[in-house]
Amino acid sequence: MLDIGQANISGNPQRQRMRFNKLDLNLLVALDALLTERNISRAGQRIHLSQPATSNALARLRDYFQDELLIPRGRQLILSTRAQELVEPVREILMRIDSTIATQPTFEPSETMRKFVLLLSDYSASVYIPSLIASMYKLAPQSGLEMRSLNERPLEQLEKNEVDLLIIPSQYVSSAHPSKPLFEEQYMCVTWKGNTRIQNQLTFDDYIEAGHIAGDYSVNHQHAPAFDSWFLERFGVKRRVEVTAPTLTALPQMVVGTNRIATVHRRIALQAEKTLPVAIWTPPIEIPTMIQTLQWHKHRDGDPAMQWLIAEALRVGKTI
């Protein structure tokens, strides 16, 4: 992101500034941080400014817009109506500047030391990322990957330029930014080999009557698995979920020693079968295929490094 510099934002007249209609454009970085954090101390930390310098920036912004922008309400600061209107335009401007000015015109994978930030689930980290890391190590040995756990606000982090790529199921993709299918996945059922109720076959009645272990996490403020709402709508019955966990890869381990069942991705089931005393079954119902998807910010289309990473990620997705 842009380097605003503490001296510049705190009003040093010796420092050259970019101005538009009498607005110091460097203040936009401070404005974005203030509108996002709604806290002077946290905003200052975000853009590496002292609290006095950040307060000074807020005072100058209030003077320019002739608006309080952040209004004290008890111990909190809330956004004025004008500030709410500025959130998206300011973020959009900064992303455009960053993608236009900060992006290198050429990119050589073998020489880059760039670290890319990916937001993804433990499932993708387990079944997909090892292949991507191996491929990147051959082509760009000095590059790096920082992986962050998928949470309830992936799109917000993408739009704030906090992550480079999202790896998410297709139902959570935003139409506001480019995306491409990465790979497809089927579902399997997993039970303990010592299960006393399910031994020779898995019937629909077995599936309904069993207690279930399911992953429970949030994406775009929607609780997953979305499979449950689909199942209820399709069959008019609800699974009896007895155990939930904020993970996908560990679900097969949790059926061991119980008569419960877990419905997991096929690749997870096959991995578990190699090391755990579990049996895997074809589901007694037809479950829609999951399409794992790659998404990036629309302003990154002109970034050669990002386009290389996207192309390599898609290529690897075809091989797993």
Image (cartoon, rainbow, N blue to C red):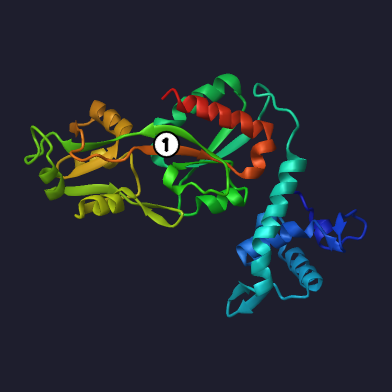
- Is 202 displayed left or right of 28 in the figure? left
Is 216 or 44 nearer to us in this picture? 216
Q: In which quarter of the view is residue 233 placed?
A: bottom left
Residue 259 visible? The answer is no
- Is 129 displayed left or right of 10 in the figure? left
Residue at x-position 57% and y-position 48%: 158
- Is 205 displayed left or right of 171 in the figure? left
Residue at x-position 66% and y-position 43%: 299
Q: Which residue is mark 1?
A: 124
**Could you tell me residue 280's position as x and y percent?**
20, 32
Residue 28 visible? The answer is yes
| Identity of the residue furthest to the bottom in this view | 74
Residue at x-position 79% and y-position 56%: 26
**Could you tell me residue 135's position as x and y percent?**
52, 22
**Could you tell me residue 194's position as x and y percent?**
10, 36
**Could you tell me residue 257's position as x and y percent?**
15, 41
